[in-house]
Image (cartoon, grey):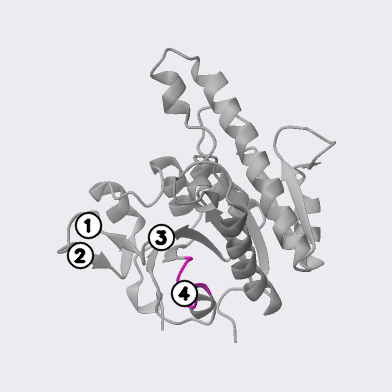
Amino acid sequence: MLKYQRILLKLSGEALAGANGFGIDPTEVEAIARRIQEVHALGVQVAVVIGAGNLWRGKQGLDRGMDRATADYMGMLGTVMNALALMDALERIGVYTRVQSAIEMRAVAEPYIRRRAIRHLEKGRVVIFSAGTGNPYFSTDTAAALRAMEIDADVLIKATKVDGVYDSDPKKNPQAKKFDHLSYIEVLNRRLEVMDSTAISLCMENHLPILVLNLWDENALLDALQGKKVGTLVNDGERENAQP
């Protein structure tokens, strides 16, 4: 019995990069595609939002005086490139995929249409949402929260390279404490870097749970879908209902 039937997976752009942290590494993209394939094979409906930090970081431009909206639009275009790379990797292993873009570019992606996205999911296709929300000043974290609510996802899964949320960087602090469960308010008050505050607030207002886990742990995603205790769950604060 699966705990979640429809999920939105939030990936950072860096997840697609190689050891140097920049660009698109086909090996990394293929590894992510296989993780998604495993979940998809169980009958889970999967939607994806990808960042663009591997291709462009707006802060680099802002530090040199670039207009914020221009920097953000460049980032949105970067997410389309990442989405196409993941689409190709998924299709090559037999997973039917659709890329939808919040910025219209019909030659490479469908325009984002909520009801069409839901229909694709119902037909067993993986849907990759690109170009953020289509608006500057909003992060891909916020886009992930927004799209998750629009498609009525059961959970927003934030994929990272650590096994949950800690009170400090576990790579720098061996004594860092891992949280199994947090409320939205705790995340905001502690300023924990789960997602940005706009995304957390959107999830809180609409009671959308967030699960932070290590996508590179071979079993983490599958275990989470089967209701096992994995990563860090962020919700309204009902610990007894958080995980079995």
Single out the residue that lies furthest toward the right.
107
Badge count: 4
| Residue receiving disc 1 | 167
Label 1 or label 4, whichever comes before in sequence order: 1
**Where are the magenta residues, as a range?**
215-221
Q: Are marks 2 and 3 in contact (CB under 8 Å)?
A: no
Residue depicted at x 45% and y 51% = 19
Q: Mark 1, mark 4: which one is toward the viewer?
A: 4
- Amino acid on which disc 3 is placed: Lys
Q: Secondary structure at mark 1?
A: loop
Mark 2 neighbour density, 10 Å: few (under 14) some (14–19) many (20 or more)? few
Between the residue at mark 4 and the residue at mark 2, the CA separation in whole angstroms equals 19 Å
Label 1 or label 2, whichever comes before in sequence order: 1
| Residue receiving disc 3 | 161
Between the residue at mark 1 and the residue at mark 3, the CA separation in whole angstroms equals 16 Å
Say if the magenta span includes residue 176: no
Q: Mark 1, mark 3: which one is toward the viewer?
A: 3
What is the magenta segment's predominant secondary structure? loop
Label 4 or label 2, whichever comes before in sequence order: 2
Residue 12, percent across and down? 50, 49
